[in-house]
Amino acid sequence: MAAIIKGERRGRPGRWIVDFRDASGRRRWRVCRTREQAEQVLAAVLRQARRPGRPAGHPDTTLAEYAPRYLEQLVVTAKPRTLDSARGLLERHVLPALGPLTLRALDRPRLKRLLADKLRAGYSRDTVRLILAVVRALLNAALEDGLVEANPAARLGRQLRLMASPAARQDAIKAMDRTQLRAFLEACRTHPSAEVRRHYPLFLVMARTGVRLGEALGLRWQDVDWRGRALRVERGLSGTGRHRRLETPKSGHGRTVDLSQQTLSVLRRLEVKRKAETLRRGWGEVPPWLFVNTAGQPLDASRVRKVFRACSGPPACRATGAPTACATPSRACSCRPASPRPTSSASSATRASS
């Protein structure tokens, strides 16, 4: 039976002790400075005891012990890039400072100090926001496993002003207007370098359909519906070099987008050129990918970004990495992206119309 006793009875004068048995049946003490603090600890112990089932682990599990278990859970639900990012943030920033602490010992003051130390060390607010995000997700998992009573990282970003306001986020978006987009595509189409001109169909498809760069690089010829003037987005290509991998789109499922007559014509010409190039280079068969390099392999995302800069995109737009849409679409605008079909995700529709 859990109870509060005076510290004098256990050789801790001036303190209050919560005496209880944990989920494994082991007798434990919690030493508190005040009676009020002891009552709060007792209430938490009783709430934990009333929960159905037992915690998925020892109550004194440390952060360093729980982190590998959390990452194992993340393998099932997250994309490889997200998993790598979470592992890196934990190993570089979180575990060195908080790893020896038990999950129950993590509180808001400790987390605030960690994040404040990172800001003082010169890390950007975006990096610190990502550190907080992975800690919050880990503690949510620990909460579901019954190892903590509450998540001390919840709503912490607003207190430290790590979250930009909607107005600030909107202001940070850099998109081309109609004139800039038209000039960029023309510069790419007529560029002196054949390698740069090779990227023109890719940039046109991205600008007209609103697909992301990874989704565009993952497109195959079988995804083009010539008769229906549509494009099926089923996959994305992420990573570079030997670390490239296919994965589902960011939304988690595929979608269909319409193709303008101009985009369809460019893809038809690209198909003819690709067949001729296959014969000329002795590839044996036409590569399945829409956009390939001179070796018949999918274009590399980092190289695409370099080509984008080589095409003299407007300086204000270069941070986006590649043109995805016209900033001011209208019925009269010839560079308006094609609208996704009803099967498209809401996020894709937003990208195509913003």
Image: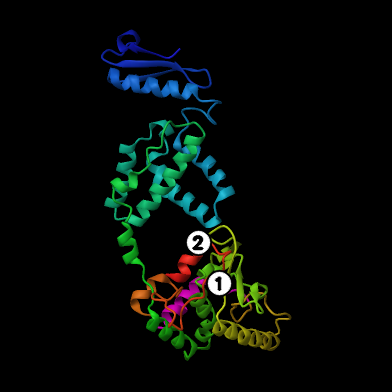
Residue 258, located in which quarter of the rendered image? bottom right
Residue 124, located in which quarter of the rendered image? bottom left
Q: Which residue is mark 1?
A: 216
Q: Amino acid under label 2?
A: Ala
Label 1: how many Cα within 10 Å (few below 14, some 14–19, many 20+): many
Q: Nearer the viewer, mark 2 or mark 1?
A: 2
Q: What element does badge 2 sit on?
A: helix
Percent of width and height locating residue 113:
30, 42
* Residue 334 appears in the rendering: yes
Q: Main secondary structure of the magenta part?
A: helix
Q: What element does badge 1 sit on?
A: helix
Q: Is residue 66 above or below residue 28?
A: below
Q: Residue furthest front?
A: 331
Percent of width and height locating residue 338:
52, 75
Q: Residue at x 45, y 77 (%)?
A: 306
Percent of width and height locating residue 349:
49, 66
Q: Which residues are magenta?
A: 297-312
Q: Residue at x 29, y 16 (%)?
A: 15
Label 2: how many Cα within 10 Å (few below 14, some 14–19, many 20+): few
